[in-house]
Image (tube, coloured by chain):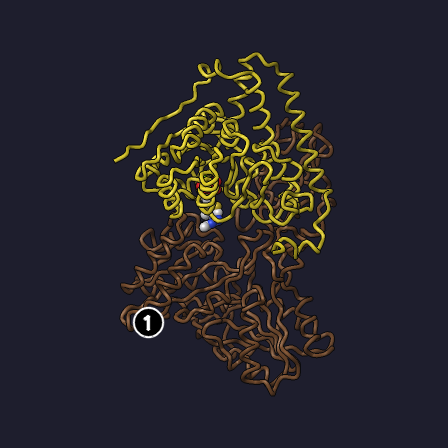
Amino acid sequence: MARAAQKDSKTDSGKKLSNVSRDDLLKYYRQMVLIRRFEERAGQLYGMGLIGGFCHLYIGQEAVAVGMEAASKDGDQVITGYRDHGHMLAAGMDPNAVMAELTGRSGGSSKGKGGSMHMFDIETGFFGGHGIVGAQVSLGTGLAFADFYKQNGNVSFTYFGDGAANQGQVYESFNMAQLWKLPVVYVIENNEYAMGTALARASATVNLSQRGSSFGIPGETVDGMDVFAVKEAAERAAEHARSGKGPYILEMKTYRYRGHSMSDPAKYRSKEEVDEVKTTRDPIDHVKTMLQQAGVSEDDIKTIDNEIKAIVLEAVEFAQTSPEPDPSELYTDVYLEA
Amino acid sequence: MTDILMPALSPTMEEGTLSKWLVKVGDTVAAGDVIAEIETDKATMEVEAVDEGKIEALLIEAGTEGVKVNSVIARLEGGTSSAAPAPAAAPAEAKAEAPAAAPVAAKPQNDPEIPEGTPTVRITVRDALRDAMAEEMRRDDKVFLMGEEVAQYQGAYKVSRGLLEEFGERRVIDTPITEMGFAGIGAGAAMTGLKPIIEFMTFNFAMQAIDHILNSSAKTLYMSGGQIKSSIVYRGPNGAAARVGAQHSQDYSAWYAQIPGLKVIAPYDAADAKGLLKAAIRDPNPVVFLEHEMMYGLEFDIPDVEDFVLPIGKAKIQRTGADVTIVAHSRMVGFALKAAEQLAAEGIDAEVVNLRTLRPLDTDTVIASVKKTNRLVTVEEGWGPMGVGAEIAARVTAEAFDDLDAPPARVHQEDVPMPYAANLEALTVPSVEKIIAAVKQVTYK
Ligand SMILES: Cc1ncc(C[n+]2csc(CCOP(=O)(O)OP(=O)(O)O)c2C)c(N)n1
Ligand SMILES: [Mg+2]
């Protein structure tokens, strides 16, 4: 029987610092702060009634999307579930278009027709934005099938949650991906909860990196709060997939700071638990500390913070001033002309 | 200076209680700091500062109830002035999210099931459903509830509140997110005579499980030559909530109502919910029970009797009238009643038939009504083609062709996936105005 490799990447900022350029540090810091500030504003707009329905914030998980993105190449694809704003920003989508989609305006990436859970951007290879838990896993495997079919050397980064990891289609996909050696990296964002259900209450085994072991798919558990650990693991995984060895699983240990969606009071976990993560494992604080160690001044950090603030405020402004879609849009995009 | 506004916890929240301030005037806060706790009947949540600055004023006292969403609750000094647009900036469409038609008092109702003079109690649809399950679980140990978040979280929409406490983990069971798996487990358990209630967080997710509902539950009695029964209830919210987009807003009434072997129920008010869910649980057949999220929080009077069970397969005349028959089910009954109220002011007297059950369909009640009014309008939340309205129109034209004074009219969702944008969503879903227009069409007014 093929044995799946198991490795644990641990944070060791002191040691890693030497392999990381100051520019990289600044880039990751900037991207992660952009996601956090963007999401905070989205939460605010929701509270004001400008965003409706469901709105799942990515706050706390920023290092995963940003670290993974650092290992991707042009042409690679990304697909995820409904907690998708962070991935879109990391993939380089325009914050204005993302925020305007949240407010349902014509300037949104789906012209306002998709909403928070359903955004796509063919340019950046972002394939959504899916609302049915687990569906993106088969779809992401299909993106990898297309890469394999076209032999284009691209990889599909397929993200899903710890809760989604129990869906049946995940294992159907794992089997085919390994059988056909499809270039897919499965990124399980283990933020410890699926709505109100803690991982151990829904999973017979909790080491999600080993979920592919019966198919012989290698997997690693990664500190998903450490953008460098994420990036390094992502590089290994992408290399494995790109070189024709088939799928690879990365279990990202992360945490969501907010409720599942806006109306979740999150009573299933203690305030102390959340505070503990915020104060000891915050992914942005981690990079900030490294920036300071690398000699970047407070003023330089503040300059970035202010730039990000301006970008997000512009997105907020755009998302409120962009007009609603024209009523005629109701009937467009249902079919293409044959 | 930045205004901090009372946030909404959910699309339908209009006001809440500001339970606690976690900061005081003069404190400096950073973006993301928790500054207050607010509460509604459903949830407690923290309010975070979205900007940095010094708290200049707390304008609402802790403990104040009924604080309107978007009213200013505090002021930050410093901060970016454009950070929090004034409440007036909130667009009008936010209002469109509120239930468009609240239930209205109807003309004397014709409900043969309930004796004249029966006392009533006021209860939400949510609690009526919970009570129905609790009563049936007390009656019969074979009944159990299984689904995502039904136990510890008390239901994603709080429908199963209190059930875990009363019945314990053996009978109120949280599942992983594995619809096909747990629906199949329910269907299998039912084959042995257990009576599962399988809750889908919403029926959108039952698409993962529809194979078991159809292939394993609906057909088993037939395939086994009558040996294996499937007394199982598949329930959960169906249809469109507010602004949740294409994958979370679908009405499956017509889908399930097409399947022989299934019974399909779509309650409107609390009485329907309680009386029919109890009947569904007792029924020896597989039942698909289609609830509506937008109805859960609404209160209605229900008969205050010991064991309130309604018959499956019987429609209810929700409002009597002489000029036109409006046939609806689920939330659309409320829309139809509201339309009838407005039409009455214009001198059109509409009768509203609440179907209650879609399979078996109570054609007799509908036909009898049409024979009286000679005009038919059907209303459903789902798409029109091949829909519930199409079926009713076909039966009425086949059985009461000579009684019709106008071709039947159908009101339904536009023939497109559900858009997210507020203005487009409002255009696509059925509305009171669309029902009124359809009535005018068939009455040539
Ligand atoms: C098939 C299906 N079942 C249920 C749901 C409702 N639902 C949405 S998100 C969610 C929890 C998913 O948790 P997880 O996979 O851990 O992702 P996270 O939200 O933590 O990012 C559930 C049950 C759904 N959208 N689709
Ligand atoms: Mg999770």
A46, above or below B335, in the image: above
Quadrant the C terminus of chain B occupies: bottom right
Quadrant the N terminus of chain B occupies: top right
Disc 1 packing (10 Å; few <14; some 14–19; many ≥20): few
Give the percent coordinates (x, y) of residue B99.
62, 59
In the rendered structure, the answer to whether residue A159 lies left or right of residue B54 reads left
Q: Which residue is mark 1?
A: B222
In the rendered structure, the answer to whether residue B109 lies left or right of residue B444 reads left
* Location of residue A204 (image quadrant): top left
- Chain A painted colour: yellow
Q: Residue furthest left?
A: A1
In the rendered structure, which amino acid carries the disc numbered 1? Tyr
Looking at the image, can residue A291 be seen?
Answer: yes
Nearest to the observer: residue A143 or residue B292: A143
Nearest to the observer: residue A250 or residue A161: A250
Q: Residue at x 43, y 66 (%)?
A: B277
Q: Residue at x 71, y 75 (%)?
A: B440
Q: Which chain is brown?
A: B
Give the percent coordinates (x, y) of residue B368.
55, 84
Q: Residue at x 57, y 38 (%)?
A: A85
Nearest to the observer: residue A5 or residue B445: A5
Give the percent coordinates (x, y) of residue B204.
49, 55
In the rendered structure, the answer to whether residue B258 lies left or right of residue B63 reads left
Looking at the image, can residue A267 be seen?
Answer: no
Give the percent coordinates (x, y) of residue B417.
58, 56
In the rendered structure, the answer to whether residue A249 lies left or right of residue B121 reads left
